[in-house]
Image: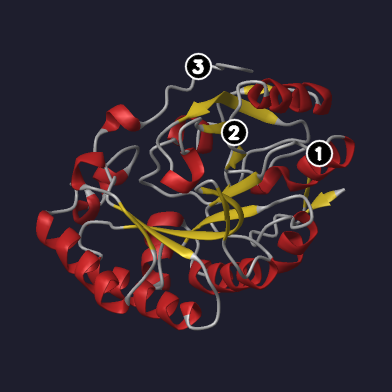
Amino acid sequence: MKCNICPRGCNVDREKAIGVCGSRTQIKLAKSCVLQWEEPVISGGHGSGAIFFSGCNLKCCFCQNYEISHQNWGKEVSIDRFIEIIKELEAKKVNNINLVSPTQWTSQIIEAFSLYKPSVPIVWNSNGYELSDVLERIAKFVDVFLVDCKFRDSALSLKFCKAQDYPEKNQHAIETMLRLKPNIVLKDGIIQSGVIVRHLIMPNCVRDSLAVLDYLDGLKRIYQFYLSIMSQYVPMYKAGDFAEISRKITPLEYKIVLKKATELGFDGFMQDLSSADSCYIPKFDLEGI
């Protein structure tokens, strides 16, 4: 079957070739662990059961997980083993199953969840470069969308992610997610259903961050969701090839974006500048795989 699961529209037979995401047909994983570093409503006290997928359909030059997203490092597993990994995380009393960068594996994930329904919420943790009809297919198996809103400026997304249409496709994706999960549902402080939109502040991109906030401000007048502003940017992978993003963000850049978010009255989370440290990046060592 030709793969057109994401906006790239590679139209390749993944049994015989690979597209932009670098993936074949068998699920490939790099790590499974209890993660404590997500938003409070995700991690809570028991942690989030994170499963890191190999490959990625969005080629960000600054990706902190480049070993698995760009270099496609990991181990192939069967659908049965994938289900076992989910059960092993559930046995650790995690708050949810957190699927990190799952888009290119949508069909395989649907197959797995058709065979086994986890007892905890499923979090779809994605870059937001997705197709609305694919999101509608996965929505019956997913409880929470944890989605990036990286850029509103197509020149930036082209330069840094090789995806000029990211703002357009991302907008469609986020609005589809909000339509499918229009309200936040909590239980004992842990999200059970809803949407969390993440935005990573990047150096020399404050103007675009403010445009992201203006866009999301319009949506919060219609839908209920959390905004998660992230300050964890550390220049990694090929970020050094671009002078404008070859450093961490400054306190002033951080302050400007947070001031705007506060003025607009967003409900959600704001990382401290101390999060911009490579010590928070997971080691991809096949743990739990």
- Could you classify mark 1 by the number of other residues whose Cα lies within 10 Å: few (under 14), some (14-19), or many (20 or more)? some
Closer to the camera, 187 or 142? Answer: 187
Q: Residue furthest front?
A: 188
**Residue 36 left/right relative to 251:** right
| Residue closest to the eye, 72 or 261 | 261
Task: Confirm or deny contact between disc 3 and disc 1 (CB under 8 A).
Answer: no
Report the quarter where the C terminus lies: top right
User: Is residue 20 something one can see in this rendering?
Assistant: no
Report whether residue 287 is seen: yes
Q: Name the residue under label 1.
A: 117
Q: Mark 3 points at which residue?
A: 285
Badge 1 amino acid: Lys
Q: Name the residue under label 2.
A: 54
CA gap, disc 2 and disc 1: 23 Å
Q: Quadrant of residue 9?
A: bottom right
| Amino acid type shown at disc 2 | Ser
Q: Earlier in the sequence, mark 2 or mark 1?
A: 2
- How far apart are the alpha carbons under marks 3 and 1? 27 Å
The residue carrying pointer 3 sits among few (fewer than 14), some (14 to 19) or many (20 or more) residues within 10 Å by Cα, namely few
Q: Is residue 137 placed above or below 288 in the rendered structure?
A: below
User: Is 107 rendered above or below residue 253?
Assistant: above
Task: Return the x and y of residue 98 as percentages of the image width and height.
Answer: 59, 39
Q: Which amino acid does label 3 sit on?
A: Asp
The residue located at (67%, 44%) in the rendering is 122
Left or right: 84 as drawn, with respect to 264: right
State the image quarter where residue 4 is shown: bottom right
Give the image's coloring scheme: secondary structure
Question: Can you give x and y, in whole percent of width and height, for residue 18 in the image?
Answer: 69, 40
Discs 2/1, front: 1
| Mark 3 secondary-structure assignment | loop
